[in-house]
Image (cartoon, grey):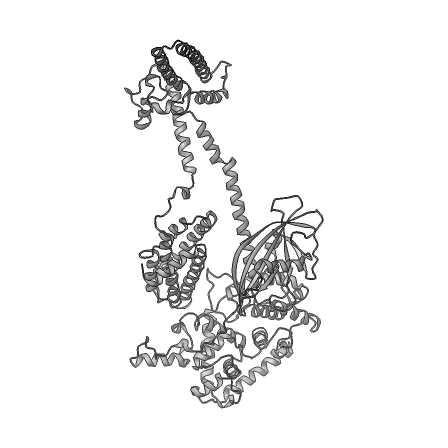
Amino acid sequence: MQAVKESIQGSQKRARTAAAKPLPHKALKPEVADKLGNAADDIDIEDIAFFTAQEAIQIRQELLAWYDKHHRVLPWRRNPHSLRQAKSDDKYHSAALDMPQQQFAYCVWICEVMSQQTQVSRVAEYFTRWIQKWPTVQDLANATQEEVNDMWAGLGYYRRARLLLEGAQHIQTVLSGQMPLTATELQKIPGIGPYTGNAIASIGGNQCVAVVDANVVRVLARLRKLSGDQKSSGMVKLNTRLADALVDPVRPGCFNQAMMELGACICTVHQPPACGACPIQMHCQAYKDMQEFTSQGGNAPQTDAPVITQYPSKAVKAPRRKEDVAVCVIQLLPHETIESNDSRYLLVQRPSTGLLAGLWEFPSCTMMSVATDEQPSQQEVIDSCLHALLGCDSLQDTGSMQLLRREHLGSVVHTFSHIQQTMHVELLTFQETQPAALQGQSARTIQWVSAMELSELGLSSGVKKVWKMVIAHQAVVQEKKAVMQDKKTGPFRKAWKQQRLKMSPFATIRRASSGYRGRCRADSNSADGKQSVKDQLGDEVLRKLKEAEQEAASLREQLAEAKAKAKASGDTKLLDDIEQQQEQTAKQISRITGTGMRREGLFGGGDESWLKEADMDFFARGPSETADAVTDAASSAVVQRRLLIGIGLTGAAVALALVPTAELRGKPSKPLFFYLTPLVRIQQLLIQAQDLASNGNWTELESLRSRIQGQPNSARENLIYAFSCLEDKGKKTKAERIAFDLLEYLDQINYNKYYESMGAVGTRGGEKEKLFSDFSSQSIKAAQGKLKQFMALMPADDLEAANVAANGGYF
């Protein structure tokens, strides 16, 4: 502790000495800025003056006063001078003020490493889980690399996780578990550079050293109108000197956090800066230039108008390298089992160095990005990879497992900082040919894991995307199996069968009576042992039917004998009479057997017909005293008949309701490209919408949203018509699901419309305006992705025609 106090006192003395030396105040000349931007190391920075002593003091006071009132509450921060009132929407608690210094310095180290290239909200979630698992540097030093990778999964830049573990082990073994609290000593630890070392030393050890990250560079560039490449060696030295001149000697940690907070929340890069809320706006030369231009009658939209966002200069990023990767997901079914619930999946571990070092992934191989005649196909690339991995010459003969099926699942794009990777995914399903455990024969480390274990592993974001594709594919397969099963034994087929067997006025007498009797047999005897009315009626119908059939058979025999005698005697007139009688007899028999009932009409049977016209009046108009009067003897039969008719009609309605709506929807009359043309225009409009959302131009964004959802593009109508045109049922189902997701995103591209009551449009500023803009941008990006997926399912010829029509203005 004595060494720490002496270090702090020394830092404060040096800071007071530097502040006492007056520095002439002048802006950086353009030619000097250009030289610095070109990384000219021959510029003597000592000859360039930046802040006066008084100005530096004022900036410190104003910035710290603002920070004490408005700082964010984060689990790795503590501010003993805080004046901020707790809010109901605070998600986290600040670090305890009585936390030991060594533990607090460890927390600062973890959060600073996590925060590199990662949003603070995401860092807070990972930081909380990390500290719960490894609350001290000693706990982290005892962890394994695989455990650290699992915890880090999803944050990206996995080299940071490896260096954190190496740094903790260095502190534990070389430094006896004690973290140094000075920047110089901290930078001797593996993985800790100037930025991280200064952050730990100033925030955790109160050493007077400046922290320079992207947020601080942006604030300094606008304070002093610095152009040029901020990553050049000259500009790095310049920004370091500027930050050193401003850092507060008494509260260096809070000041450094205040500078970063100002850049993150007020002096922003992706959104217009909230200059009205900036505590040090009067010291900002970029802001002064803008104010002077406006006061002199300048118009802001002019091309030569000064804008704050022109500082710092935007660096030109190198385009990402494009890479195609063949990914193979191997699913292994247990011995003599066809169920996928107990499947295992093959994972391989990446090399210990390089991209995603030491992480687990599905077997993959890089493909040639430029197509050539001699280029191997995706399947050949995967086969070659698996032959080496499994130690076999053919996938059909792997020794311990048999290939059942091979399916192409599609492609998914994953972006790294310098690589745009397109992963082409195949699913190979094998089955063990023997119950013995399968062992890998490759020199690379492999493991077989269950679906549950795979979901819990620390996988990279790219591997998670592939796994989601597999889960989605398996869900579709299971759904298809369920549909096929329902068609065979499901409720719809049962209802359909029952409906066919129901008695109706169009069923034959034989089928009606036998089916009716079968139903009556279920309750053939009543509770007192007597034969039920239903069973009596059923037996009576069968008895009469049997008598009618016997009489018809006897009549046919008699007519056949008479016809034979007439032919033998040559009596033509008698033969004609017999044939006429045979025809009439056939009609009578057809009425008995039911074969002619359909031709008789609905009520053709007269008084003896099964369905009465009064029955139809009963169901159409309700009961009537005159039209529905029946005798006591017939009342039971009437009630029973109408009950059966009602059941039949209800069954028909239920069966109709079970028919999917998609099956009833007719196909559109126009060609598919006609409906795709507005969707092509919507793709173009979404690009415009992204710019409008970024600039917070809510009025134009709402107008554009109306053009997308309403006339002339009518997103909902054209999406529905488009997927209805598809012949392939699988693609049609997938397109329908994507279409309704897309419509939901389209409705949310103007987030501002939900919160107009919170203030006039575009005047909120600060975090609210940024929140609205960010949410709208995310919705637009999601809509673009869904629309791209939807269009990928459409036939290429129709897409080409739609693009020609949209770009040529035919519609």
Q: Give the quarter of the figure containing the N terminus.
A: bottom right
Residue 189 on image: x %, y %: 65, 74
Instruction: Tell me the residue at 39%/17% (across/down).
Output: 586
The quarter of the displayed image where residue 501 is located = top left
**Image position of 436 (left or right of 115):** right
Instruction: Tell me the residue at 45%/32% (across/down).
Output: 496
Residue 136 on image: x %, y %: 64, 66
106 vs 428, nearest the viewer: 428
Residue 574 on image: x %, y %: 35, 10
In this rendering, does residue 650 appear at all?
A: yes
158 vs 258, nearest the viewer: 158
Looking at the image, residue 791 lies above or below residue 39: above
Residue 534 on image: x %, y %: 45, 18
603 vs 313, nearest the viewer: 603
Query: Which residue extends farthest left?
Result: 626
580 vs 714, nearest the viewer: 580
In this rendering, does residue 750 appear at all?
A: no
Looking at the image, residue 22 lies above or below residue 649: below
Looking at the image, residue 792 lies above or below residue 645: below
**Image position of 535 (left or right of 702):** right
The quarter of the displayed image where residue 744 is located = bottom left
Looking at the image, residue 251 lies above or below residue 142: below
The image shows a total of numbered marks equal to 0
Q: Give the quarter of the figure containing the C terminus.
A: bottom left
